């Protein structure tokens, strides 16, 4: 007869797809329970922002069972740009891997000091963190995650370490932003603050969060390298990312040209984003061009290139589904007209609190709201026009309201399935249950640090 302990051992965390579908059902039920409400939006310098005094309840608009499935289709349409960015980004990576250039480079690394260097992960994480903190790098990293997953596995780590080196590092930088125009720039504009003012304190925050996240990742990475069975994803199928090792494999001039092409691709995307106002569509175009050129340099014929495109897309099927379902959650909340009601309710919780408690509550509210509004600029437009007057009423410096928004919008991207974590896990083929087992303790540490820095900002008069 099975015991209670046996039953506990048999429990298996649901797959990412099932978890997201379950959340979709729960949110749809909420549209019957949570009152529908809306704020009026006004134009401010070409941006639609909330009129904080305009909230009103409207007729209930629950999402019925049939509309749930219509919303799934709408969710996939809503996430189409991200889906195609992932598909074409992986086509580029897959094309390079098929030429053998990536394998040759990995073998060169494995035969050098890089294999045992304890500086490799910290340096890679620093580069990505600075990119997220300074110029707002985020979505572009999706196309690079497969590279670092493959690299991490080849170096004796696991997929979680590869995702942390790239996706998590850029998210930590994005959250501890210094000059990020998409979060700090927009929020300070709404707060009528000098652009990128208060920079010194934010650099201190960036350094602390980078060091803490890097130390936690290194601790896990060393444990996995010492004993692979300690990996939280031990036993998962990562054959798509496996690089065959051969110490005698030469790193030819053609291979070097292809790897140089990968660097040029990244530089092109960064330049286009900063100077030419490129966004996801243009990035996808660059990935397609780079994938085709890499295949041609590698000696592929047209039929071979077409076959690689189909194969690479098939390997990202789970990632496509995860993006579509995560966007479905947002579609249902929008159709049910409950997002503004949630914002209004969160705002009401902060009324009448002392200054330091207002800062802390803003932090909590921003973390929760990121589930409903995972866009950094979108959340700034929706909530900062409410937070800024509230900060003034409680004599909380507006800079601290921006800081609470920055933290709440950034770090919870790695927590909520409507944010980046579901997409990154889909790309890296990491089950979300195992991701949460890995990340929740880290998020707890990060949240305590966020709370500390908000309280410290209040007491030192940060402005």
Image (cartoon, helix red, strand yellow):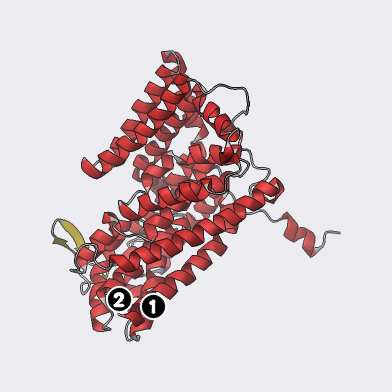
Mark drawn on residue 456: 1
Is 24 above or below relative to 395? above
Q: State the quadrant of the N terminus.
A: bottom right
Q: Are marks 1 and 2 in contact (CB under 8 Å)?
A: yes
Mark 1 or 2, nearer chain start: 1
Horizontal side of 262 relative to 425 (left or right) equals left
Horizontal side of 9 relative to 28 (left or right) equals right
Seen from the viewer's position, the closer of residues 252 and 92 is 252
Residue at 14% across, 56% down:
46
User: In the orientation shown, which residue stands out farthest toward the right?
Assistant: 1
Residue 345 found in image quarter: bottom left
Q: Is residue 17 visible?
A: no
Q: CA distance from mark 1 to mark 2?
A: 8 Å
Residue at 27% across, 42% down:
273
Is 354 above or below relative to 444? below
Judging by the rendered image, the residue that carries numbered circle 2 is: 462
């Amino acid at each position: 007869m099975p015991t209670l302990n046996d039953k506990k051992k048999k429990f298996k965390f649901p797959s990412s797809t099932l978890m997201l579908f379950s959340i979709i059902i729960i949110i749809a039920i909420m549209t019957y329970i949570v009152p529908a409400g809306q704020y009026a939006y006004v134009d401010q310098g070409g941006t639609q922002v909330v009129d904080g005094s305009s909230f009103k309840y409207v007729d209930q608009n629950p999402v019925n069972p049939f509309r749930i499935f219509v919303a799934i289709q709408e969710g996939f349409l809503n996430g189409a740009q991200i889906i195609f960015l992932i598909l074409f980004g992986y086509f580029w990576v897959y094309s390079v891997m098929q030429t053998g250039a990536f394998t040759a480079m990995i073998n060169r690394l494995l035969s050098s000091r890089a294999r045992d260097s304890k500086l490799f992960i910290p340096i890679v994480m620093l580069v990505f963190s600075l990119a997220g903190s300074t110029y707002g790098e985020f979505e572009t990293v999706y196309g690079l995650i497969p590279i670092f997953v493959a690299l991490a596995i080849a170096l004796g780590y696991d997929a979680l370490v590869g995702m942390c080196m790239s996706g998590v590092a850029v998210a930590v930088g994005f959250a501890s932003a210094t000059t990020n125009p998409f979060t700090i720039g927009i929020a300070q504009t709404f707060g009528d603050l000098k652009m990128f003012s208060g920079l010194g304190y934010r650099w201190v925050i960036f350094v602390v969060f980078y060091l803490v996240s890097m130390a936690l990742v290194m601790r896990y990475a060393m444990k996995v390298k010492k004993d692979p069975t300690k990996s939280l994803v031990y036993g998962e199928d990562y054959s798509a990312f496996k690089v065959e090792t051969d110490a005698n494999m030469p790193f030819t001039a053609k291979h070097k040209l292809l790897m140089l092409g990968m660097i040029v691709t990244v530089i092109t995307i960064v330049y286009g984003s900063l100077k030419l106002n490129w966004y996801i569509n243009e990035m996808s175009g660059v990935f397609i061009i780079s994938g085709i050129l890499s295949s041609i340099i590698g000696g592929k014929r047209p039929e071979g290139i077409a076959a690689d495109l189909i194969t690479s897309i098939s390997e990202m099927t789970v990632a496509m589904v995860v993006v579509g379902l995560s966007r479905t959650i947002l579609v249902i909340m929008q159709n049910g007209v409950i997002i503004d009601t949630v914002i209004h309710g969160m705002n009401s919780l902060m009324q009448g609190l002392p200054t330091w408690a207002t800062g802390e509550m803003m932090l909590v509210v921003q973390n929760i709201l990121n589930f409903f509004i995972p866009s950094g600029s979108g959340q700034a437009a929706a909530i900062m026009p409410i937070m800024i007057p509230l900060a003034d009423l409680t004599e909380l410096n507006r800079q601290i309201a921006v800081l609470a928004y920055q933290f709440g919008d950034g770090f919870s991207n790695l927590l909520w399935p409507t944010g980046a974590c579901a997409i990154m896990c889909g790309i890296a083929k990491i089950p979300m249950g195992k991701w949460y087992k890995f990340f929740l303790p880290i998020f707890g540490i990060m949240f305590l640090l966020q709370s500390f820095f908000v309280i410290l900002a209040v007491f030192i008069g940060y402005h």
